[in-house]
Image: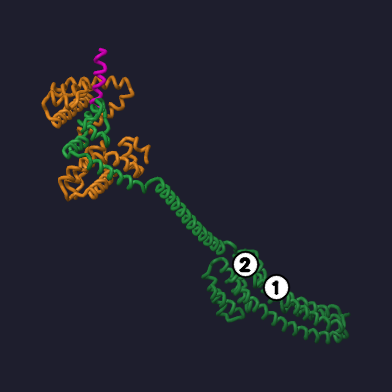
Chain colours: A green, B orange
Amino acid sequence: MLSSKPNNEKVLKVFSPIRCLSKDQLPRYLEGRLTDVEKHLVEQHLTDCDLCFNALQALEQEGGTEKYQDLTNKLQRYVHESIQPVSHIQKVAQYTRKEKNKENLLVYFWLVAFIGMAIGSVYVLRGHLRNQPVVNKVMAAATPAKDSQQITVTPQQPIVTENHTPATTPTVTQKPAPPVTPAATAAVTKKADSLAIIKAAKAKALQKKAAADSIARKQYAIQKQDSLKKAAADKNKESEKKTDDTPVTKQVTKDQAPPEPVKKETAPVPVNSDEYLYKAAMVYQQQGNLSEAIDRYRRIESVSAGKYVEMARYQLAICYRSKGQMGKARRMFREVVRMDGSLKNAAQQALDSM
Amino acid sequence: MHQQLTNLSDKELISRARKQKDREAEGVLMDRYSHLLVAVTLPHLNNNPNLDPNVVFPSLLQRLSASLKTQTIYKANEWILHIQKGYLGKPEKSTPFYPSRDGRDLLHIENTVDKAATNIIDREDLIVRLGQALQRLNADDNALITQFYLENKTFADLTATTGLSREKLRDQLKAAKGKLAKLFMNQGYVK
C-alpha cells in the first residue's frame, strides 16, 4: 500500500503540462548537461511538444549552435525593439491623446449644444413676441392715437368755454375776451409743443413695426392740429365777433344768449358721438380687449361716415395685425389706402412693412 | 523590461494581447518562443539560400501577430509550429490553425490534472480513474508508459532496451499517451 501510493501519484505526471524548453535548455540537453530530474522533465515535454522536438532535431542536424544563438539574439532584439515604442512613454502619450480627443469632443459637443440652445431661445423668443404680448403692442399702437384724441378733445374745451363764458356771463365785457384768446392759442401751442416732445420720446421708444404707425399718427395729429387751429382761429374770430356783439345783446336781452350756445352744442353732437364711440373702442384696444375693440370699430365703420370710418378701419387693421390675422389686416390697410384719405400714407407704409 | 509579463502563462499573454491589444504581452510571447522558432527554421535557412533571415523572421512574426488576433489557440507551441510550417510551405497562403480533437482531449485532461493539484478528493478520484485507464491500455503501451513516466527512465535507457530509434520511441510514447487519454475520456462518459 505504502509503496504503491507514490507510484499512483506518478500517474498524474503523464498528463501534467510542462513548459517548452528555454533558450539555453535546448543546447544543454543536446550536450547532456542537464540534471536527471530536469532531463526527465524535458523528455516528458518532448513527447508532447512537436515544436520543441523539431527544434531539437534541427539543432542536432545542423550541428553548430552559434548560428542558433546569434539568430535567436537578433530575433529577440528585433522583438524588443518592435515592442519598445509601445512602452510606457508611448502608452502615456496615447492615453493623453485619447483624453485630449475626448475633451475636444466634449468642447465641440457643448459648443453645438449652446449654439442649439441659443437658436432655440431666439426662436422661442420670436414666437413669444409674435403671439403673446398683445397688450404691449396695443399700447404702442394706441398711445399716439390717445394723443390725437387729447388733441381733438382738449382744444375744444377752451373753445366751448369761450363760447359759454361770454354768453352765460353777461357781466364779462370786452376786456376779458382779448386776453382769453391769446391764452387759448398759447395753450394750444403749448400743448402742441409738449405733445410734440412726448410724441418724439414715444416715437423713439416705439418698435420698428410701430414706427410706421406712429409716423402716421403724428402726421394725422399734426393735420388735425392744423385743422383744429384753423377751427380755433375761426371760432376765436366768431367769439370776437360775439364779444363784439355781446354788448349789443346785453343791451337788448339777457335771455338771448343761452339759445345760441345750445344751437352750437347740438351742432357738434353727431361728430362727438362718433368720436366717443371711437374713443371707447380705443380704450378697449388699449386694455387689450381686441375682439371688443374690433366690434366697436366695425360698428363705427358701418354707422358713421367720413374720417372716422377711415380711422376705424385703420385701427381695425392694427387690431388684426396685433391679433396675428395678417390677411385681414392687409385687407383693411388696403381699404384704407383705397379710401385715399389722410391715413393713406400710413396705411401704405404699414402694408409695406408687413 | 516586462518583469510581470514574463511570469504569466501563455494563455494569459494571449488573452492580454487580444483583449487589451497589449503589444508588450504579444512581444513577451514571441520572445518566449523565438529561440524555438529560430531552431525550427534553421534547416530551411541552411538548405534554401534564397531565404534571408532578415526577411523571414519579421514576416513570420507579422503572420503570427496577425493570426494571434483571430485564431483560437489552445497551445502556443502547436500554433507557432503550424504557422511556421504554413509560412515555409506556402508563403502566399495562410492556412488557419485548427486544434485537433485529440489535442483538445489532451488539453482537457491536463487542465483537470492541473486543477486537481489543490483538491485532495479530486486528486484521489483522478488517480484512481487514470489507473483504471492505464490498466485497460494494451500491454506494450502500458509497459512503455509505466517505464517512462512511473520509473523515470530516459529516452536513452528505453532506446537501449527496446532497440527503437529515439524518434520512433517518442512517436510510440505519444501514441500511447493519446490512447490513454481517449480511454480516460470514454471512462469519464461511462461514469
Q: Classify mark 2: residues with Cα within 10 Å, few (<14), some (14-19) or many (20+).
A: many
Locate residue A82, reporting x and y percent. 32, 48
**Which region is colored magenta?**
A1-15
The number of numbered discs placed on residues in the rendered structure image is 2
Residue contact between numbered discs 2 and 1, judged by CB atoms under 8 Å: no
Residue A298 visible in the picture? no
Residue B11 included in the magenta stretch of the image: no
Q: Residue furthest left?
A: B163
**What amino acid type is highlighted by mark number 1?**
Ile
Q: Position of B89 compared to A323: left or right?
A: left
Q: Would you say the magenta stretch is mainly helix, strand or loop? A: helix
Residue name at image x 59 percent, y 71 percent: A208
Residue tagged 2:
A138
Gap in angstroms between the C-alphas marked 2 and 1: 18 Å
Residue tagged 1:
A198
**What amino acid type is highlighted by mark number 2?**
Val
Closer to the chain start, of discs 2 and 1, is 2
Residue name at image x 34 percent, y 45 percent: B23
Locate residue B118, reporting x and y percent. 33, 24
Determine the secondary structure under disc 1: helix
Residue A98, above or below A150:
above
Q: Quadrant of the N terminus of chain A?
A: top left
Q: Position of A60 compared to B115: left or right?
A: left
Q: Which mark is residue A101?
A: none
Q: Classify mark 1: residues with Cα within 10 Å, few (<14), some (14-19) or many (20+).
A: some
Determine the secondary structure under disc 2: helix
Q: Position of A123 compared to A315: left or right?
A: left
Q: Position of B134 compared to A157: left or right?
A: left
Query: Which chain hosts label 2?
Result: A
